Amino acid sequence: MMPTTAATSDLPVSRPPLYRQLYVQVLVAIALGVTIGHFFPGTGVALQPLGDAFIKLVKMIIAPVIFLTIVTGIAGMKELGAIGRVAAKAFAYFLTFSTLALIVGLIVANLLHPGTGMNIDPATLDAGKIAQYQQQAHDRTLTGFLLDIIPDTLISAVADGHNILQVLFVAILFGVAVTMVGPRADPLMAVLEAASHAIFKLVSLLMKAAPLGAFGAMAFTIGKYGIGTLVSLAELVATFYFTSLLFVLLVLGAVARLVGFNILHLIRYLKAELLLVLGTSSSEAALPSLIEKMERAGCRKSVVGLVVPTGYSFNLDGTNIYMTLAALFIAQATNVHLSLEEQLLLLLVAMLSSKGAAGVTGAGFITLAATLSIVPSVPVAGMTLILGVDRFMSECRSLTNFVGNAVATVVVSAWEKGLDRERFAAAMAGHPLPPPPDGEEPVLT
């Protein structure tokens, strides 16, 4: 990171008027979407293309954003030892806190028993409603993890952009290759850096449509499923939101405190992105902006480039909480008693099946189907009990995943002594410093 000049280093970035700030626009859009969906459900359902189109716009650039960020980040480390060190620390963090999230879900489900008393007979459940999810889960396990991450060609992973793991695999290999080439790759690096600036400028243009996408997605969700859908399974939904909040404030909050920052300040800094995730139920919608925000907050670019994209596949705290909590809810609702050994088996299976789940709407439900298919004690047909409210829980999953990856980026940056404390403190105080002279303007403010 190049040092800022004395003329700009102490000056906060000027803020646009309130009505022009993205988080305000998204918040208003969400409120309007809820209103339309509740009072005019038919119209709300008809607005689905707005949300779907915005998600498709963002997914259009996810692959190039991840590829360019990882390649330039890895190549910027200059030595393979540094790449391995950062990767080892990142995956140690992912494994630790993903496992903690699974354990927290198990503990809360055993303490609160959200499904006890429903007395559902599995034979009465319509398993046909979840057939598509079972097939997707079956295809995922049948393909095999290793074969799934290897694309047909070097170009196809980025060109198709449908499989984040394949993009990660190709980007990491290419970044390592560029590093090994050394100075002879400098012309190529100049092209990749320029392309990266252009892609993030495109991101800033696409983000202007975020309020419209959040409006359409929220109107559809409320119009199709209705707020009343929450009532029948309110205890499960409330338990999941409570557990996720507990994990963020206590577990991630403790980690943040140890590193030297307040988790609430980080949440405030990322409020625009979090509202976008809430409105669209997809953490992928805010991935490019998270990369931009973390770099601007003082996290070293090379660390951000490696931690954020890989975290979207391997650090899914919200999805992990959901998996164990939902599995035990189904078992309790269908009067299936799970012994400690069976719960530990469920935990181990969930640890494996959750890795590589994309941060898109519905991925958590598919991953849950994959997990239950391997643990026969819990009837897979029981997933029909939560199908109606899964969309509402998807929002919480995405929010928790997003915050977890933001915390992971700061923590690994601090471990690597790659955190600009002055710039980070200014961002957490709500007065982010201007971008470095060689950087682009931030996507969000």
Image (cartoon, rainbow, N blue to C red):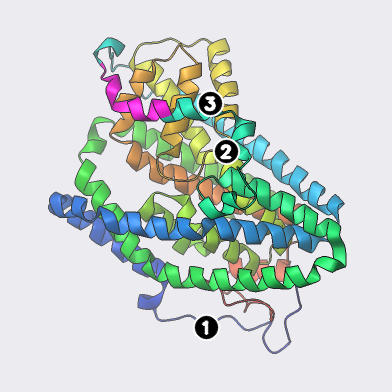
Q: Residue at x 80, y 47 (%)?
A: 84
- The residue carrying pointer 3 sits among few (fewer than 14), some (14 to 19) or many (20 or more) residues within 10 Å by Cα, namely some
**Label 2's element?**
loop
Q: Residue at x 39, y 46 (%)?
A: 395
Q: Amino acid at mark 3?
A: Thr
**For the view shown, which residue lies furthest in the front direction?**
153
Which secondary structure type mostly characterizes the magenta part of the structure?
helix
Please tell me in which quadrant of the rendered image residue 241 appears: top left
Nearer mark to the viewer, of 2 and 3: 3
Residue 210 location (% of width, % of height): 38, 64
The residue that label 2 is drawn on is 356
Relative horizontal placement of residue 141, taking residue 334 as reference (left or right): right
Distance in Å between CA atoms under marks 2 and 1: 39 Å
Q: Amino acid at mark 1?
A: Ser
The residue that label 3 is drawn on is 141
In the rendered image, the vertical position of residue 397 relative to residue 159, given as above or below: above
Q: Which mark is residue 14?
A: 1
**Label 1's element?**
loop
Residue 253 location (% of width, % of height): 59, 48
Distance in Å between CA atoms under marks 1 and 3: 50 Å
Nearer mark to the viewer, of 1 and 3: 3
Residue range highlighted in magenta:
125-135
Q: Residue at x 55, y 69 (%)?
A: 200
